[in-house]
Amino acid sequence: MIEARSLTKLFQDKKRGTIRAVDDVSFTCRPGQIYGLLGANGAGKTTTLRLLATLLQPTSGGATVAGCDVRLQPEKVRANIGFLATSTALYGRLTARETIAYFGRLNGMAPAQIAARTRQLADELGLHEFLDRRVEKFSTGMKQKTSIARTLVHDPAVLVLDEPTLGLDVMAARTIVRFVRECRDRGKTVIYSTHVMSEVEKLCDVIGIIHHGRLVAEGTLERLRTRFGDPDLEEIFVRAVGGEEVAA
Amino acid sequence: MNWSNVVTVYLKELRDSLRDRRTLLSTIVVPTLIMPAIILSAGTITYKIVNKAREEIPAVMLLGGDDSPVIRAALGANAKVKLVPATADWKQRIIDKKLRAAVELPPGFDAALGHGELATVKIYNYESELRSGFAVNELRRFFTEYRDKTVTARLAAQGLPASLIKPFEIRSANVAPPEKVGGNVIGGIIPYFFIILCFTGAMYPAIDLTAGEKERGTLETILCSPVARIDLVVGKFLLVLTASLATVLFSLLSMGATFILGGILLAQGGGAAAAARGGAAQMATLPTLDPLGLLAVLAMVLPLAVLFAAGLMTIALFAKSYKEAQSYVSPLIIVIILPAMMAMLPGVELNTRLALVPILNLSLVSKELVSGVWHWHYLAMIFGSSCLYAAAALALCVRMFNRDSVIFRT
């Protein structure tokens, strides 16, 4: 479970002054649920997820992830999450097996446990063919699968996914979408940020629309459709953010 | 701090680095092969150039002296110079390096000597040019000898002994042990090499493990694992330190091997020894250093390596990309070289104030150490202050890793 309470993050910029990247954001994401954080580029999605993953410290407000406070127990929070983003790359000079083992060890797993988990993940994701090859020679799809295995090695209760399909081809993106669904089916708490409407429609149980750092609308797709009186998510999004032109 | 995580991070970074051609090049290949190659080739080339210059019989022009056949004949009989006919463009020919030197004899030189009058011989040369310098040395030797002979003849004519104007001889002999002489000869260069290698060895991995990881997107991947930032920093720092010390060690071993090999060649009367017979007898023995002192220098380098590793990581972490980090770090080489070189200047001696100046203090004390001189109070001061600077740099590095604005600077 993820619970964000008035989560706020301010950045100081020499030219623009104080930037409210995340502004008083509160939401709850339950186990077995995919919470879709929908927003344009620069809306505050990545910062929100980085705050939940304890990569950044909130300026005010707080959050608990799997019962752990992001301010007080950052390492415990990270031990309970799997964080995957387009910005989280892999070490090119390590093999897929070494990558999985490295993150397993950092999560306190024993060598036997790691070996068993690697076999299991390789079976599930089809990694066997390239498990002992260096990542630098991988195709995008192979890298994605290895990244998923790296994210899941410690079987985390919560998954934080920041635009994981950005820049991927159709096949690689489908692998991700399938993996997210499977995680939900296994009862994991999933928070998923994107600006792709179709992904949200296909995947998310609850949608939070974020704009200029603020959560401007929240609810299931049906509820949002009722509230904004439009079946099209793109129209809902535009109305929620105030009808203004949103930078792509 | 969780040491198990530190070791995990360190071992991963070590494995990663050992598979990286650039790290292997800068840490092992360059210090092992290139440094001795440079030293040997530079040494051999210099040696050959000097020997060739020594073997050359310099072309010397005699200006004037048409009325002094005695000195002309004596100079012409000297096989160590080749007299060429006088021309008006002698200055230009010296500048063009076609002529090594010119000797100007005053009118009536022979006659002046006969009458006991003072005559001045002028030698024109190309200052700082090696072969011109050798020609001047030879001319000076010739005219000094000629003057001495003239004086001796005059004294003999008066029935006086030669010792009248040369009542005693002056001779000097070295009593300092060879390692002290060696320390003075190359004691300044050894720490200079160590400091530069220590820095350059840490440079590449420090950038790669910070700005490089930022650029490749792997820093965010590792930051979202449960490893604490301090464990991550210490693990990475230990790898940078390892690379720095490995660079020093590999270069030391290969330089040692080069010296031993050079020594064997000299002892066997090989090419170098043959060259030494050509006049540079001092080259026949390699400088000796105090081995204990050398070990102490290595120990003193340790806190400096820590300072470099942590300092470089802190600076490189600010950069968004590898290239940006390189532009921050590269100018620092000058900052490092300056104090390292200052120790080689004559008159710069170790004192309480200089013992607190990083890099310079190590350079100065190393010069003493390899000569077998142990200033314990200075050693304690330098080691202590270096450890303090290193600890401060490491603390700053950890702090930087905890700053969002640095880690996620875009």
Image (spheres, grey):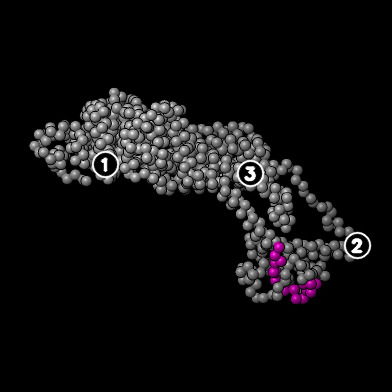
Q: Is tag 3's residue or tag 2's residue first in the polypeptide sequence?
A: 2
Q: Residue at x 85, y 62 (%)?
A: B152
Who is closer to the viewer here, B374 or B125? B374
Q: Which residue is mark 3?
A: B256
Q: Residue at x 72, y 70 (%)?
A: B82
Residue B63 falls inside the magenta stretch:
yes
Cα separation, mark 3 vs mark 2, equals 61 Å
Decide if residue B362 is in sight here: yes
Residue A114 place in picture, x, y as percent? 39, 29
Q: Which residue is mark 1?
A: A173
Task: Give the magenta-colored segment's residue range.
Answer: B55-73
Of circles 1 and 3, the one toward us is: 1
**Image marks 1 and 2: residues in contact by CB distance under 8 Å:** no
Q: Residue at x 30, y 38 (%)?
A: A85
Residue B386 place in picture, x, y as percent? 53, 35
Decide if residue A242 is in sight here: no
Q: Which residue is mark 2?
A: B159
